[in-house]
Image (tube, grey):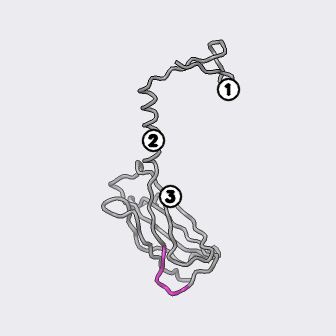
């Protein structure tokens, strides 16, 4: 049993007196520690890769790449965005690397997940992925190269 000074820790002792008695069983301390460590380690995983295109054209320095990890399981509904990353290229050329995070506990192995990408400059869409780049479930990878196609202006 440990006695703690209530005022020192900003606690209010409703039982009276100037100390609080705290007694934690060793098994409870161990269980709490394991639970916290387990959730921290399993909470985040990533999908990573690059966005590129086949045209021999340089990106302008102010181009922006947007990448999303989405659940595309429902054919008659919009994709559900799980994570997204907006990358200011600042003159960097393709391939542009990305990393998207997700909680593995929220991934349903029966669902289909994909990475979508697009490149904009001056706020206008210039390239977009037109293929489903499947990831995570049903034998699909967690690292992928996404090829975007030019948009007709």
* N-terminal-most mark, 1 or 2: 1
- Tag nearer the camera, 3 or 1: 1
Q: Is residue 49 left or right of residue 61?
A: left
Image coords of residue 146 (percent x, y): 44, 72
Q: Residue at x 45, y 51 (%)?
A: 103
Q: Nearer the viewer, residue 90 or 119?
A: 90
Q: Residue at x 61, y 21 (%)?
A: 4
Q: Residue at x 57, y 17 (%)?
A: 21
- Tag nearer the camera, 2 or 3: 2
Q: Is residue 132 magenta?
A: no
Disc 1 on helix, strand or loop? loop
Q: How far apart are the alpha carbons under marks 2 and 3?
A: 24 Å
Mark 3 Cα-neighbour bin, 10 Å: few <14, some 14–19, many ≥20:
some
Name the dominant secondary structure of the magenta segment: loop
**Residue 85 sits in quarter:** bottom right
Q: Which residue is mark 2?
A: 37
Farthest residue in the top direction? 16
Q: Is residue 24 left or right of residue 107?
A: right
| Magenta residues, start to end | 51-57
Image coords of residue 2 (percent x, y): 55, 20
* N-terminal-most mark, 3 or 1: 1
Image coords of residue 17 (percent x, y): 66, 12
Is 125 rendered above or below residue 102?
A: below
Q: Nearer the viewer, residue 60 or 2?
A: 2
Instruction: State the mark number for residue 83.
Output: 3
Instruction: State the mark number for residue 10.
Output: 1
**Residue 6 sits in quarter:** top right
Is 67 rendered above or below residue 41?
A: below
Q: Is residue 115 left or right of residue 120?
A: left
Disc 3 on helix, strand or loop? strand
Q: Nearer the viewer, residue 43 or 30?
A: 30
């Amino acid at each position: 049993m440990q006695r703690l000074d209530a005022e020192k820790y900003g606690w209010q002792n409703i039982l009276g007196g100037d100390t609080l008695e705290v007694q934690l069983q060793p098994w409870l301390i161990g269980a709490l520690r394991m639970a916290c460590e387990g959730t921290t380690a399993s909470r985040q995983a990533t999908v990573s890769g690059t966005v590129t295109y086949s045209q021999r054209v340089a990106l302008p320095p102010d181009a922006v790449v947007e990448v999303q990890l989405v659940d595309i399981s429902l054919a008659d509904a919009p994709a559900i965005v799980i994570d997204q990353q907006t990358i200011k290229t600042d003159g960097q050329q393709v391939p542009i690397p990305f990393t998207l995070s997700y909680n593995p506990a929220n991934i349903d192995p029966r669902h289909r997940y994909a990475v979508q990408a697009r490149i904009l400059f001056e706020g206008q869409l210039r390239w977009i992925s037109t293929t489903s780049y499947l990831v995570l479930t049903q034998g699909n990878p967690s690292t992928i190269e996404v090829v975007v196609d030019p948009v007709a202006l």
